[in-house]
Image (cartoon, rainbow, N blue to C red):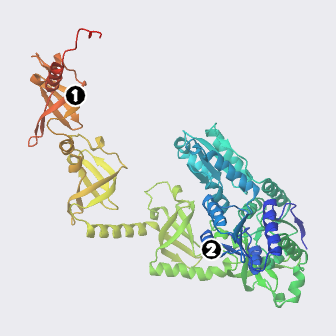
Amino acid sequence: MSEVIIAKNAGFCPGVRAATERLHARMVNREASERIVTLGHLIHNEEYNAMLAANGVVAVTAAELPQLAADATAAAPVTVFVRAHGINVQTRKMLEELSAAHPGFSFVDGTCPFVTKIHRIAEKYSQAGGEADYVFIGIGNSSHPEVEGFMSCFGGEKYVFANSSELQAALDDGFLGKISSKTPIMVAQTTQNLTEWKKCQKLLKKGCTNALIFDTICNVTDSRQTEAAELAAVCDGMIVIGGTESSNTAKLFDICQAICPDTLRVCGASHLPLVKTFSLTHRKVGIVAGASTPQEIIEEVYKTMTEAENFAKLLEETEVKNLHTGAIVTGTVSHVSDTELQLDLGAGVTGYIKADRVSDDPAVKLTEQFKVGDSIEAKVIRVSDIEGVAELDKRRVDSGKNWEKVVAAKEAGDVLEATVAEVVKGGVTVFVFGNRVFIPASQTGVAKDGDLSPLKGTDVKFKVIETKDQGHKAIGSIRVVLREERRAQEEEFWGAIEEGKTYTGVVKSMTSYGAFVDLGGVDGMVHTSELSWKHIKNPAEVLAIGDTVTVFVKSFDREKKRISLGYKTEETNPWFIFTNKCQVGDVVPVKIVSMMPFGAFAEIIDGVDGLIHISQIAMTRIGKPADVLEIGQSVDAKIIEIDSEKQKVSLSIRALLEEVAAAEAAMPEEATEAPAEE
């Protein structure tokens, strides 16, 4: 029999207890005609909510409130209890308006005081235009009702990060730069993991000295998590009790499992058989419970554990007393951890399979591959009445069956997918159907003598190209699959190509005469003359290897597998841009770029120059353009002629000077004498 220790802070927190007590008091004293409902589940505990439903108290959604209010009368009132996690601003406003409009409709606010505190913080900094000066940051589960509720109280810019890792990723992505003009306000979900919360505080303080950080984790949550960690450190097994939707229960489970790998999470009565078996295989078990776990459920779990019978006695009294080494048995998974599987073999007998006896693949995570209720066939390798365990090996049963699958895949030419487990001498290894497959370096698709280490941990597609029954050895090839995929892509590409069709590709390589673009397994070339409307000597003046570009097909040859691509378009033609933007008579800013004896050339836009003839530079005769202008000088000029056929533009500075002079001449002379006084 195990030594069982219940945490002092297990079960209802003050906020949850207050909400449930108010509801129970109303249930006891309600009139026969009164209807009581909860807005969402009052607390996150399935058995408690089932008890409420059995007593006529059901959970409703916000969408159902208007109809409930319309149906409520003084003779048949409706009372809504708001859950301990709180609600959003819109729903609260709806409740207030409905209760004011319908005398028979009312609501009772069961929101936890710690949650209400966060609502007030958000509302305070959102009022009086504060949202323009602040950014609100919540640390917690964005889909949790509590977080949805308090985030709705802030009307400005706001963000939710689940943990320190998400916050760090945002900071690395320049988050502080985006909010640099505002003061950050940071709060935490009341049940947030304390360690994660401290990490988040440290990260924000490091990059933002003006941040306002409010410690909003419930002090009971803090004590509960600390006690759970201390208990897990001295026990060889931990049981965490709480609803599947309970956030604080999930965090307690994570804390306990990190310290005591053999941690079991249960909801209540439905998991008592697991609890009974768990107690048989551990010397010292700790029990912790989430804030939404009723005391009755905790006591029931404790009672079940302390009354569990001895495993040896169960073996003696059941049909499986002849369980022996070498027997093939079938069991139902009752508990999963990353180190082992626990199986119910029937009649109270428990079997264990260590991770290395489940699969040969070291990358397999039991918690991802198996779940409670799965049926597993395994071979018995040891039975101990004293320890109360039957140790099993799943690999020995799977080996023969799974090898047949590998051979069949090779015969059928099936494409398989697996994660690269290891990089070994001469290649890499993957595991498929529980069997090791070696992929030589030459079959990986990596260049000769290339680094294979980046492949580790990646998912690859491959084919089994050789098998040896003796020793169950298999050789695979990634290159074969890549080659087949490339051929399929090429066939699809050449079947759909046509002149003028646009593609998005990546610049693969460049030569002095053009750039080669990968269009998705097929390369095309953009000649240097097609890269720019201006004369360029090298493609590198416009593009770089790795650039993503949009190109179009100018011509192609299916037989020779050649594609000529275009890059520059009429829309990017400087002359097209100029003529759509400017016309004769417009005054434009220009920059002097060169000078000749007969005039100066000025850049109007990139790629289009205009000539300012020497006669159009000044109002008086000048010897040469340099007497008035300098290269690089910016001046205003008037467009006096556009020759579209020759793509030439004539400009005039003189025209602007003459206009100014004419305007000055037309101005009336100012009076020189002051008017006489009357």
Q: Image check: 643 left or right of 402?
A: left
Question: Which quarter of the rendering shows the C terminus?
Answer: top left
Q: What element carries label 2?
A: helix
Asked if residue 618 is positioned above or below residue 569 in the image, the reply reads: above
Asked if residue 227 is positioned above or below residue 83 in the image, the reply reads: above
Mark closest to the chain's N terminus, 2 or 1:
2
Residue found at x 86% / y 75%: 300
Task: Give the residue type at disc 1.
Answer: Asp
Task: Name the residue that disc number 2 marks.
Answer: 70
Residue found at x 13% / y 26%: 655
Q: Residue furthest front?
A: 678
Could one spot residue 646 in this view of the protein?
yes
Task: Give the residue type at disc 2.
Answer: Ala
How far apart are the two marked residues, 2 and 1, measured between alpha carbons? 73 Å
Location of residue 519 (image quadrant): bottom left
Classify 10 Å Cα crowding around label 2: few (below 14), some (14-19), many (20 and above): some
Which residue occupies the foreground of this view, 518 or 153?
153
Q: What element carries label 1?
A: strand
Which residue occupies the foreground of this view, 364 or 246?
246
Q: Image check: 156 left or right of 662?
A: right
The label on residue 636 is 1
| Residue 415 position within the rendered picture, expressed as x and y whole percent measured from the top left | 46, 74
Q: Image check: 374 left or right of 607?
A: right
Could one spot residue 389 in this view of the protein?
no
